[in-house]
Image (cartoon, grey):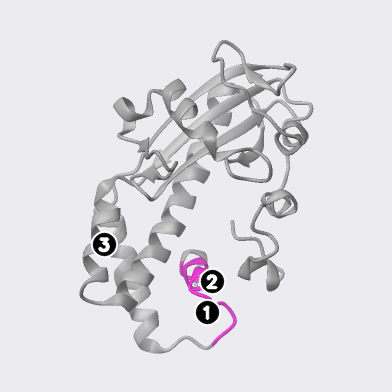
Amino acid sequence: MDRTKAEVLRYLGRRRQTVPAELDAMVDSCMARMRETAAPRRVWRIFDLEGGADGLVPAGTGLVLPGRDIRRHLAGCQKVALLAVTLGVGADTLIRRCEHTDLTRALVLDACATQLIEEVCDEAERAVEADAEMKGAGRFSPGYGDLPLTLQPGFLAVLDAGRRIGLTCTESLILLPRKSVTALIGLGGPARPAAGRCVCCAARGACDFAKRGEACL
């Protein structure tokens, strides 16, 4: 089984279970359909990293990154990249339409979209490192640990994400399109494994992945 399918099945909670042939075929068809439908776009900017009384600051942005978790994640980094990635409205529309006709397929499509956005984020992270000519310290998103989601509007404004990739957020801080990610990437410091995010994740006490000894990303 290839890694992509294995990850989709993991999101569906079927990693260590026998997969029925019907579900196996559905994952293949849904991933193919999601790849056809999604229109991945990405945008990033790289800034010098400064310290401030209220938190770290990407120089010149006025955006303050408060909290101990992001300070720990970016410790030793010279620069920070602000990254936004989206699969576009087509992915959301495909899942939403399927919810009215075939809930199982909709769930599989959602898992496929989750896997695809992670692939796109990984590619974008490598592109950021190449642009900066520095190794990255891994992604860290608003909402992880004590880094608040209230950063989202300012984060998107710094990137001009609405105009550049069609990514906005609601008053309740939900990203639109839904299959989108914003993240900070420390540059020029020590690498931090993705699994380390669990330590500062606000959902760690109730996360099904953590209960199985796994990382969600």
Residue 173: in magenta span: no
The residue under label 1 is 14
Q: CA distance from mark 3 to mark 2?
A: 21 Å
Which element is circle 3 on? helix
Name the spot of residue 5 as percent of width and height, x first. 46, 69
Marks 3 and 1, the one that precedes in the sequence: 1
Is label 2 in contact with label 1 (beta carbons under 8 Å)?
A: yes
The residue under label 2 is 10
Question: Foreground residue, 216 or 162?
Answer: 162
Q: Say above or below: 177 vs 68.
A: below
The residue under label 3 is 96
Q: Residue at x 38, y 64 (%)?
A: 110
Name the spot of residue 151 as percent of width and height, x first. 54, 32
Q: Looking at the rendering, which quadrant does residue 31 occupy?
A: bottom left
Kind of residue indicated by mark 3: Arg
Q: Residue at x 37, y 73 (%)?
A: 27
Q: Say above or below: 21 vs 188.
A: below
* Magenta-drawn segment: 5-17
Q: Say above or below: 130 vs 48.
A: below
In-image side of 64 versus 168 (left or right): right
Q: Residue extending furthest front?
A: 171
**Other residues around mark 3 within 10 Å, as few (<14) / some (14–19) / many (≥20):** some
Kind of residue indicated by mark 1: Arg
